[in-house]
């Protein structure tokens, strides 16, 4: 898990609850994957009752690069079809990633995420507060360069 995730402080936020779990296929045609997840909070080792993730990161290990690209191209297939304008390609640190603004509301609340394939991995950096600290994108893009 420590190889898949950045389990250290980033931009003043602390890693919380890194975990790994096999993922059941979302559809019968999809393969099994392994998902590594971590949250980042403003407090070191906070009690469970006070957890407030500021950033969450998922790294999903797919069987091959084709499946990783497919999962980024069709992230939640129904959502991508119903809300195509919510998904756009943007450049961050000289690399192309997909920005998902579907759950980001006009007042800045809600969730905003960035995702990209990197070889056989799919990386998702999810901001759960209005602030988007791009240091998370920079560090995860260094670890997992975009294949887009």
Image (cartoon, helix red, strand yellow):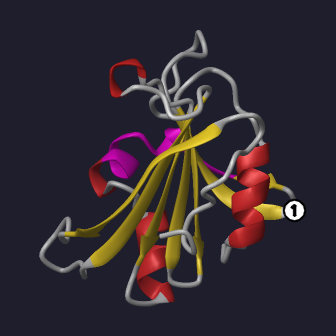
Foreground residue among 15 and 79: 15
Residue displayed at 61% across by 48% down: 88
Foreground residue among 106 and 116: 116
Left or right of 86? Residue 50 is left
Magenta extent: 79-89
User: The C terminus appears in which quarter of the rendering?
Assistant: bottom right
Residue displayed at 16% across by 69% down: 27
Residue displayed at 67% across by 72% down: 144
Furthest-left residue in this view? 28
Q: To which quarter of the image does residue 67 belong? A: bottom left
User: What predominant SS class does the magenta segment belong to?
Assistant: helix
Q: To which quarter of the image does residue 41 belong? A: top right
Q: Is residue 121 above or below residue 141?
A: below
Query: How far from the left and from the top, in percent, is residue 21?
Result: 28, 66
Secondary element at image label 1: loop
- Near mark 1 (Cα within 10 A), the count class, few <14, some 14-19 or many ≥20, is few
Foreground residue among 94 and 3: 3
Query: How far from the left and from the top, in percent, is residue 37?
Result: 43, 56
Query: How far from the left and from the top, in percent, is residue 95?
Result: 79, 64
Q: Which residue is mark 1?
A: 94
Query: How far from the left and from the top, in percent, is residue 99?
Result: 61, 46
Residue displayed at 19% across by 71% down: 25
């Amino acid at each position: 898990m420590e190889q898949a995730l950045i389990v250290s402080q980033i931009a003043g936020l602390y890693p919380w609850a890194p975990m790994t779990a096999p993922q059941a296929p979302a559809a019968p045609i999809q393969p099994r994957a392994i998902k590594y997840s971590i949250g980042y909070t403003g407090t070191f080792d906070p009690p469970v009752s006070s957890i407030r993730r500021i950033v969450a990161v998922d790294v999903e290990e797919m069987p091959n690069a084709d499946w990783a690209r497919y999962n980024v191209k069709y992230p939640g297939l129904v959502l991508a079809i119903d809300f195509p304008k919510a998904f756009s390609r943007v450049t961050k640190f000289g690399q192309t990633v997909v920005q998902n603004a579907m759950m980001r509301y006009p007042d800045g609340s809600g969730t905003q995420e960035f995702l990209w394939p990197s070889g056989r991995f799919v990386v998702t950096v999810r901001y759960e507060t209005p602030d988007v600290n791009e240091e998370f994108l920079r560090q995860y893009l260094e670890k997992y360069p975009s294949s887009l």
